[in-house]
Protein backbone atom coordinates (compact mmCIF):
# COMPACT_ATOMS: atom_id res chain seq x y z
CA UNK A 1 0.00 0.00 0.00
CA UNK A 2 1.14 3.52 -0.78
CA UNK A 3 2.67 5.03 2.42
CA UNK A 4 0.83 8.28 1.90
CA UNK A 5 -2.48 6.48 1.50
CA UNK A 6 -1.80 4.41 4.59
CA UNK A 7 -1.07 7.52 6.65
CA UNK A 8 -4.31 9.12 5.41
CA UNK A 9 -6.29 6.03 6.48
CA UNK A 10 -4.69 6.08 9.94
CA UNK A 11 -5.33 9.81 10.29
CA UNK A 12 -8.96 9.34 9.21
CA UNK A 13 -9.47 6.54 11.71
CA UNK A 14 -7.97 8.66 14.48
CA UNK A 15 -10.27 11.56 13.58
CA UNK A 16 -13.30 9.24 13.74
CA UNK A 17 -12.29 8.09 17.21
CA UNK A 18 -11.83 11.67 18.42
CA UNK A 19 -15.16 12.78 16.95
CA UNK A 20 -16.93 9.74 18.40
CA UNK A 21 -15.42 10.42 21.83
CA UNK A 22 -16.39 14.10 21.68
CA UNK A 23 -19.93 13.24 20.60
CA UNK A 24 -20.30 10.69 23.41
CA UNK A 25 -19.08 13.22 25.99
CA UNK A 26 -21.46 15.87 24.66
CA UNK A 27 -24.48 13.56 24.56
CA UNK A 28 -23.53 12.16 27.95
CA UNK A 29 -23.44 15.65 29.40
CA UNK A 30 -26.94 16.39 28.09
CA UNK A 31 -28.26 13.07 29.39
CA UNK A 32 -26.71 13.54 32.85
CA UNK A 33 -27.94 17.13 33.00
CA UNK A 34 -31.51 15.96 32.48
CA UNK A 35 -31.00 13.06 34.91
CA UNK A 36 -29.55 15.39 37.55
CA UNK A 37 -32.57 17.71 37.27
CA UNK A 38 -35.00 14.82 37.77
CA UNK A 39 -32.95 13.37 40.63
CA UNK A 40 -32.81 16.66 42.52
CA UNK A 41 -36.56 17.09 42.04
CA UNK A 42 -37.12 13.59 43.46
CA UNK A 43 -34.80 14.41 46.36
CA UNK A 44 -36.78 17.56 47.18
CA UNK A 45 -40.14 15.78 47.06
CA UNK A 46 -38.74 13.15 49.46
CA UNK A 47 -37.72 15.88 51.91
CA UNK A 48 -33.95 15.70 51.39
CA UNK A 49 -33.01 19.25 50.39
CA UNK A 50 -29.80 19.06 52.45
CA UNK A 51 -28.58 16.03 50.49
CA UNK A 52 -26.03 16.59 47.69
CA UNK A 53 -25.94 14.37 44.59
CA UNK A 54 -22.64 13.91 42.74
CA UNK A 55 -22.84 12.66 39.14
CA UNK A 56 -19.08 12.37 38.56
CA UNK A 57 -16.76 9.65 39.80
CA UNK A 58 -13.40 10.33 41.44
CA UNK A 59 -11.77 10.46 38.00
CA UNK A 60 -14.16 13.15 36.79
CA UNK A 61 -16.20 10.88 34.50
CA UNK A 62 -19.92 11.42 34.25
CA UNK A 63 -21.89 8.60 35.83
CA UNK A 64 -25.52 7.67 36.28
CA UNK A 65 -24.73 6.17 39.71
CA UNK A 66 -24.96 9.33 41.86
CA UNK A 67 -23.23 9.47 45.22
CA UNK A 68 -25.33 11.01 48.01
CA UNK A 69 -23.82 13.06 50.80
CA UNK A 70 -24.81 15.61 53.44
CA UNK A 71 -28.22 15.84 55.06
CA UNK A 72 -26.81 15.08 58.51
CA UNK A 73 -29.74 16.82 60.17
CA UNK A 74 -32.19 14.37 58.59
CA UNK A 75 -33.40 11.30 60.43
CA UNK A 76 -32.62 7.81 59.14
CA UNK A 77 -36.14 7.24 57.79
CA UNK A 78 -35.96 10.42 55.69
CA UNK A 79 -32.50 9.52 54.38
CA UNK A 80 -33.79 6.08 53.38
CA UNK A 81 -36.78 7.69 51.66
CA UNK A 82 -34.51 10.12 49.78
CA UNK A 83 -32.22 7.31 48.57
CA UNK A 84 -35.22 5.29 47.38
CA UNK A 85 -36.72 8.31 45.57
CA UNK A 86 -33.48 9.06 43.71
CA UNK A 87 -32.90 5.39 42.85
CA UNK A 88 -36.42 5.20 41.38
CA UNK A 89 -35.72 7.95 38.81
CA UNK A 90 -35.73 6.43 35.31
CA UNK A 91 -32.15 6.25 34.05
CA UNK A 92 -30.47 6.14 37.47
CA UNK A 93 -28.28 3.05 37.65
CA UNK A 94 -28.10 2.93 41.43
CA UNK A 95 -27.16 5.17 44.35
CA UNK A 96 -24.74 5.03 47.25
CA UNK A 97 -23.92 7.23 50.23
CA UNK A 98 -20.56 8.97 50.38
CA UNK A 99 -19.44 7.11 53.49
CA UNK A 100 -19.99 3.64 54.91
CA UNK A 101 -21.87 4.86 57.97
CA UNK A 102 -24.58 6.50 55.85
CA UNK A 103 -24.84 3.51 53.55
CA UNK A 104 -25.02 1.07 56.45
CA UNK A 105 -27.82 3.05 58.11
CA UNK A 106 -29.78 3.08 54.85
CA UNK A 107 -29.17 -0.65 54.32
CA UNK A 108 -30.32 -1.57 57.80
CA UNK A 109 -33.50 0.42 57.35
CA UNK A 110 -34.36 -1.13 54.00
CA UNK A 111 -33.85 -4.61 55.46
CA UNK A 112 -36.21 -3.69 58.30
CA UNK A 113 -38.73 -2.47 55.74
CA UNK A 114 -38.58 -5.77 53.84
CA UNK A 115 -38.99 -7.81 57.01
CA UNK A 116 -41.98 -5.68 57.96
CA UNK A 117 -43.55 -6.27 54.53
CA UNK A 118 -43.11 -10.04 54.89
CA UNK A 119 -44.32 -10.27 58.50
CA UNK A 120 -47.87 -11.16 57.48
CA UNK A 121 -47.45 -12.12 53.83
CA UNK A 122 -45.43 -14.75 51.98
CA UNK A 123 -43.90 -14.96 48.51
CA UNK A 124 -45.80 -17.93 47.10
CA UNK A 125 -44.95 -20.63 44.56
CA UNK A 126 -46.92 -23.39 42.90
CA UNK A 127 -46.95 -26.62 44.90
CA UNK A 128 -43.53 -28.36 44.60
CA UNK A 129 -42.75 -25.79 41.89
CA UNK A 130 -40.27 -22.96 41.28
CA UNK A 131 -42.91 -20.95 39.42
CA UNK A 132 -43.90 -17.79 41.28
CA UNK A 133 -47.59 -17.52 42.01
CA UNK A 134 -49.13 -14.51 40.18
CA UNK A 135 -50.63 -13.43 43.51
CA UNK A 136 -47.09 -12.56 44.66
CA UNK A 137 -46.47 -9.98 41.90
CA UNK A 138 -47.62 -7.02 44.00
CA UNK A 139 -45.70 -8.25 47.03
CA UNK A 140 -42.48 -8.60 45.01
CA UNK A 141 -42.98 -5.06 43.75
CA UNK A 142 -43.17 -3.80 47.33
CA UNK A 143 -40.05 -5.77 48.26
CA UNK A 144 -38.14 -4.34 45.27
CA UNK A 145 -39.09 -0.78 46.21
CA UNK A 146 -37.98 -1.38 49.80
CA UNK A 147 -34.65 -2.79 48.59
CA UNK A 148 -33.81 0.17 46.33
CA UNK A 149 -31.94 2.03 49.12
CA UNK A 150 -29.76 -1.09 49.50
CA UNK A 151 -28.46 -0.83 45.93
CA UNK A 152 -24.69 -0.97 46.28
CA UNK A 153 -24.83 -3.55 49.08
CA UNK A 154 -24.75 -7.33 48.79
CA UNK A 155 -28.30 -8.62 49.31
CA UNK A 156 -28.74 -12.30 50.14
CA UNK A 157 -31.91 -14.03 48.93
CA UNK A 158 -32.29 -17.31 50.83
CA UNK A 159 -34.83 -20.03 50.11
CA UNK A 160 -36.16 -22.35 52.86
CA UNK A 161 -38.42 -25.40 52.91
CA UNK A 162 -40.03 -27.51 55.62
CA UNK A 163 -38.56 -30.89 56.58
CA UNK A 164 -41.03 -32.98 54.62
CA UNK A 165 -39.73 -35.07 51.71
CA UNK A 166 -36.20 -35.74 50.50
CA UNK A 167 -33.54 -33.46 52.00
CA UNK A 168 -31.51 -33.14 48.76
CA UNK A 169 -34.63 -32.34 46.77
CA UNK A 170 -35.59 -29.70 49.33
CA UNK A 171 -32.20 -27.99 49.03
CA UNK A 172 -32.44 -27.96 45.23
CA UNK A 173 -36.02 -26.64 45.37
CA UNK A 174 -35.13 -23.87 47.83
CA UNK A 175 -32.16 -22.85 45.65
CA UNK A 176 -34.30 -22.72 42.51
CA UNK A 177 -36.97 -20.66 44.28
CA UNK A 178 -34.36 -18.20 45.54
CA UNK A 179 -33.07 -17.87 41.96
CA UNK A 180 -36.63 -17.23 40.75
CA UNK A 181 -37.04 -14.42 43.29
CA UNK A 182 -33.64 -13.00 42.32
CA UNK A 183 -34.73 -12.89 38.67
CA UNK A 184 -38.03 -11.25 39.66
CA UNK A 185 -36.16 -8.53 41.57
CA UNK A 186 -33.81 -7.91 38.65
CA UNK A 187 -36.82 -7.45 36.37
CA UNK A 188 -38.06 -4.85 38.87
CA UNK A 189 -34.88 -2.77 38.73
CA UNK A 190 -32.58 -4.27 41.39
CA UNK A 191 -29.08 -4.80 39.88
CA UNK A 192 -28.27 -8.50 39.65
CA UNK A 193 -24.61 -8.12 40.57
CA UNK A 194 -25.63 -7.26 44.13
CA UNK A 195 -28.05 -10.17 44.60
CA UNK A 196 -26.89 -13.55 45.91
CA UNK A 197 -29.35 -16.46 45.78
CA UNK A 198 -28.95 -19.58 47.91
CA UNK A 199 -31.09 -22.45 49.14
CA UNK A 200 -30.70 -24.20 52.49
CA UNK A 201 -33.65 -26.58 52.38
CA UNK A 202 -34.98 -27.37 55.87
CA UNK A 203 -31.69 -26.65 57.66
CA UNK A 204 -32.91 -23.40 59.29
CA UNK A 205 -36.51 -23.70 60.51
CA UNK A 206 -38.23 -20.69 62.02
CA UNK A 207 -37.50 -20.44 65.74
CA UNK A 208 -40.20 -22.21 67.75
CA UNK A 209 -41.73 -24.03 64.76
CA UNK A 210 -41.77 -27.76 64.12
CA UNK A 211 -39.35 -28.36 61.19
CA UNK A 212 -42.23 -30.00 59.26
CA UNK A 213 -44.51 -26.98 59.64
CA UNK A 214 -45.37 -25.55 56.18
CA UNK A 215 -44.69 -22.04 57.56
CA UNK A 216 -40.99 -22.86 57.19
CA UNK A 217 -41.40 -22.58 53.41
CA UNK A 218 -40.21 -19.03 52.92
CA UNK A 219 -37.83 -16.59 51.27
CA UNK A 220 -35.65 -14.38 53.48
CA UNK A 221 -33.60 -11.29 52.63
CA UNK A 222 -30.55 -9.95 54.41
CA UNK A 223 -27.96 -7.26 53.73
CA UNK A 224 -24.56 -8.92 54.09
CA UNK A 225 -22.52 -5.70 54.09
CA UNK A 226 -22.58 -2.21 52.70
CA UNK A 227 -20.42 -1.56 49.65
CA UNK A 228 -20.93 1.66 47.69
CA UNK A 229 -21.71 1.22 44.01
CA UNK A 230 -18.55 1.69 41.95
CA UNK A 231 -19.40 4.56 39.59
CA UNK A 232 -18.75 3.88 35.91
CA UNK A 233 -18.37 6.23 32.94
CA UNK A 234 -21.70 7.34 31.53
CA UNK A 235 -23.51 4.48 29.83
CA UNK A 236 -26.65 5.98 28.33
CA UNK A 237 -29.46 3.40 28.46
CA UNK A 238 -31.24 2.45 25.27
CA UNK A 239 -34.92 3.11 24.52
CA UNK A 240 -37.28 1.79 27.14
Image (cartoon, helix red, strand yellow):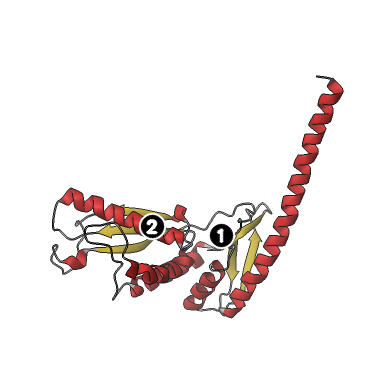
Q: Which mark identifies residue 182?
A: 2
Which x, y percent locates residue 60?
69, 54
**Where is residue 18, by image quadrant?**
top right
Q: Residue at x 43, y 67 (%)?
A: 144
State the residue in front, 68 or 22: 22
Image coordinates of residue 2 in percent, x first then y, are 84, 20
Residue sitting at x 50%, y 62%:
100
> Is 203 situated above or below 106?
above
Q: Is residue 121 visible?
A: yes
Q: Secondary structure at mark 1?
A: loop
Is residue 6 found left or right of 176 in the rendered image? right
Tell me where residue 107 sits by quadrant. Answer: bottom left
Q: In this image, 59 relative to 156: left or right?
A: right
Residue drawn at the location 22% of the way across and 61% of the way down:
127
Image position of 45 with respect to 59: above or below:
below
Q: Position of residue 20 (x, y in %)?
A: 74, 45
Q: Element at badge 2?
A: helix
Q: Around disc 1, counting alpha carbons within 10 Å, would you say few (fewer than 14), some (14 to 19), or many (20 or more)?
A: many
Q: Quadrant of the N terminus?
A: top right
Left or right? Give the position of 181 relative to 41: left
Amino acid sequence: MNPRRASLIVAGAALCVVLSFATTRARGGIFIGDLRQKAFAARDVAGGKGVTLAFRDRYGWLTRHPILSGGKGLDAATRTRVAAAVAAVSGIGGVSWANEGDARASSLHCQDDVERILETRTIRFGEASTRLDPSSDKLLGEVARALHPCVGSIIAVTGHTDAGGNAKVNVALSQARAEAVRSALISRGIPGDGLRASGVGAARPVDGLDPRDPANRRIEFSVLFSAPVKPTPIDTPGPE
